[in-house]
Image (cartoon, helix red, strand yellow):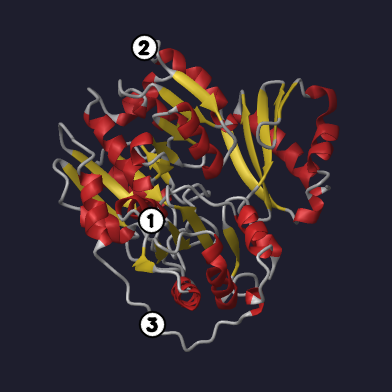
Amino acid sequence: MNQSIFRLYDIRGKYPEEISESVVFAVAVRLGVLFDKNKKIIVGCDGRVSSPALYRAFCAGLDRAEIGYVPIGLATRPMMIFLTHYRRAGGAVLVTASHNPKEYNGLKISDERGRDISGIALYKKLYTWRTSSWERRFTDDAPIVQSDKLPYDAYVSFLIDRVALPRSIKVVVDCSNGATAPIVQRLKNRVHNLSLVLINNSVDGSFPAHGPDPTRVGALKQLSARVRKEHADFGVCFDGDGDRAVFVDNAGVPLRAGHMWRLLVGDSRVHTTVYTVASAYAIAQFAPTISRAALHVHRAAVGQVSIESTMRRVGADIGFEESGHYYFKDFFNADSGIFAMMRVAQAIARLPYDLKRFRLFLPPLLPALDFSMPMLRIRQRNLFFRISHAFGKEIHLIDRTDGMACAVRDGWFLVRISNTQDVVRVYVEGKTAARVRALAQRLARAIKIT
């Protein structure tokens, strides 16, 4: 058992060398220490090529451990959270690697309240339970799992009931060949005044269109072109398991998460927001444009575990991350790409102008760039020291809420170690695009030599 696959948010690794049928079978066998055996758990999988085999092996492990479960087959992570509450289940497990490249897979495990269970905490708990089940091997004689398809109807009805559009809205939806496709297809022609145009809506675990991560360079090119062709009100691109959404306006221009927050917070019912350090400048720019005084903002570390716990603690109405996660109090304090799409459609339907004009009315945001660099965990220890050394006295403010955020002349940057891959995430903002590029190049050199 490779301990490195147990990460902060979940279990994740490359298939089959790091995560395999035997690994997920062994985890399933031991889950009796986490879940109430008097309650069934929800089990599903995303559309990756390796997911059906891992799903089958995981269910076989639950059978071996005599843990009751409801197998639902293809599902998104937000759908799993909904079903946990809807069925009053003991928890949920989704076979997925979310936005990671196609060669990855993993397990997202949540408790009876839909809260993520950390992979690191899970390893500690399972490892201390002394048994030989880590060494048990999955045999390929397990029966084919018959999945329950009825939950789709309940989930789609839930989504439809929570949106009201006062005028017609047309949306181009890029499903990224992921697990959102069957859900969005069921929403089509079901919501009054909502017209959906679907692209990349065949589930294909090789992700032939542009990969499962909508934030990567080039991922929105097809969406932007189709929005312009269809004269749509906006476009949205989901990630592989449906918990991220990245938007473009009616001119096909990609929008930052800060823009979408300002749109959503225009609803008078939104009083409290949770954000991360990468959105600090957007909050500072946009908050003064909101007329009401009763608006409260709270910063949290990056990631679902931190955002959701902060949402509950402060009673926030919404939360967001620059990576395209949008959290809602009325969606169990969790993130959902489709739920965000519905709320954005509702907000635009109430505007007296289009989304492009809304964007242009707002104060400009700083030019930004985000990128990742591969780095083995053993080399991450000296990372922040090397960056501090590289910039020296140029740094005049450091925030260690999550990773290392530094203010420098005419810009700032955030460097943090990924909790889902062996990479370093870098986010840079600057007064000009040239300044952003210069900072990014210096950071890349400093990271490369650590």
Q: Quadrant of the N terminus?
A: bottom right
Q: Which mark, by number, is residue 80?
A: 1
Hey, which quadrant is residue 17 in on the image?
bottom right
Label 2: how many Cα within 10 Å (few below 14, some 14–19, many 20+): few
Q: Which mark, by number, is residue 144?
A: 3
Q: Say which amino acid is labelled 3.
A: Ile
Dot placed on the residue nearer the N-terminal end, 1 or 3: 1
Mark 2 vs mark 3, foreground winner is 3
Q: CA distance from mark 2 to mark 1?
A: 36 Å
The residue positioned 15% from the left and 31% from the top of the image is 166
Q: Nearer the viewer, residue 239 or 352?
A: 239
Disc count in the image?
A: 3
Label 3: how many Cα within 10 Å (few below 14, some 14–19, many 20+): few
Is residue 430 positioned above or below 376 on the image?
Answer: above
Find numbered disc 1 in the image and state the secondary structure of the residue it sits on: helix
Dot placed on the residue nearer the N-terminal end, 2 or 3: 3
User: Furthest residue to the bottom?
Assistant: 141
Q: Which residue is mark 2?
A: 292
Is residue 253 positioned above or below 20 on the image?
Answer: above
Q: Nearer the viewer, residue 18 or 90?
A: 90
The residue positioned 36% from the left and 12% from the top of the image is 292
- Is any part of residue 38 visible from this angle? yes
Label 1: how many Cα within 10 Å (few below 14, some 14–19, many 20+): many
